[in-house]
Amino acid sequence: MAEEEEGDRDEDDVFLAFAQGPAPPRGPILRALDKAFFIFLALFLAVLMLEAAYKLLWPIPWANLWGWLLGTPQKEEELEL
């Protein structure tokens, strides 16, 4: 029965395409295009992640944090006015 299952396969079977042996080496232009695509993909994903982080962190009250980091207490500023 195992032989019958093996005989049912087409030669154009997608899953067998990887079993035919190693792929021929790619030319320098295709390698450059691959590298450019992966660089573009990395930059695009980085921008998406930065945008998501910005949208998540925007509601946090940063004004109080910046005042604390810079060492400018609001109470002293109010007393001067």
Image: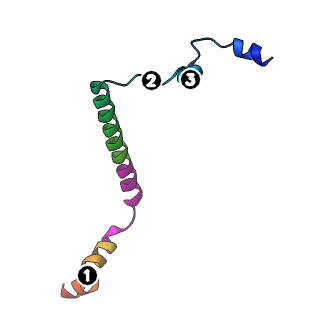
Residue 37 x %, y %: 33, 33
Q: Magenta stretch? A: 49-64
Compute the Cα span from label 3 to label 2.
Answer: 10 Å
Are circles 1 and 2 on residues that touch, CB within 8 Å?
A: no
Q: Nearer the viewer, residue 28 or 37?
A: 28
Q: Residue at x 29, y 34 (%)?
A: 36
- The amino acid type of the residue labelled 3 equals Ala
Q: Residue furthest front?
A: 21
Q: Dot 3, how many residues are within 10 Å of its Cα: few (below 14), some (14-19), or many (20+)? A: few
Secondary structure predominantly adopted by residues drawn in magenta: helix
Q: Amino acid at mark 1?
A: Gly
Inter-mark Cα distance, 1 to 3:
66 Å
* Residue at 31% over, 39% down: 39
Quarter holding the N terminus?
Answer: top right
**Which label sits on residue 48?**
none
Left or right: residue 63 compared with residue 52: left
Q: Nearer the viewer, residue 40 or 35?
A: 35
Total labels: the figure holds 3
Residue, disc 3: 19
Closer to us: mark 1 or mark 3?
Answer: 3
Residue 81 drawn above or below residue 3: below
Residue 12 vertical placement versus 26 (above, below):
above
Magenta span includes 60: yes
Q: Quick one: which residue is furthest to the right in this view?
A: 1
Considering the numbered disc 2 on the image, is that residue within a helix, a strand or a loop?
loop
Name which of mark 1 and mark 2 comes first in the sequence: 2
Q: Along the line of sight, which residue is nearer the eye, 64 or 33?
A: 33
**Amino acid at pointer 2:** Ala
Q: Which residue is mark 2?
A: 23
Q: Are marks 1 and 3 in contact (CB under 8 Å)?
A: no
Helix, strand or loop at disc 3? helix
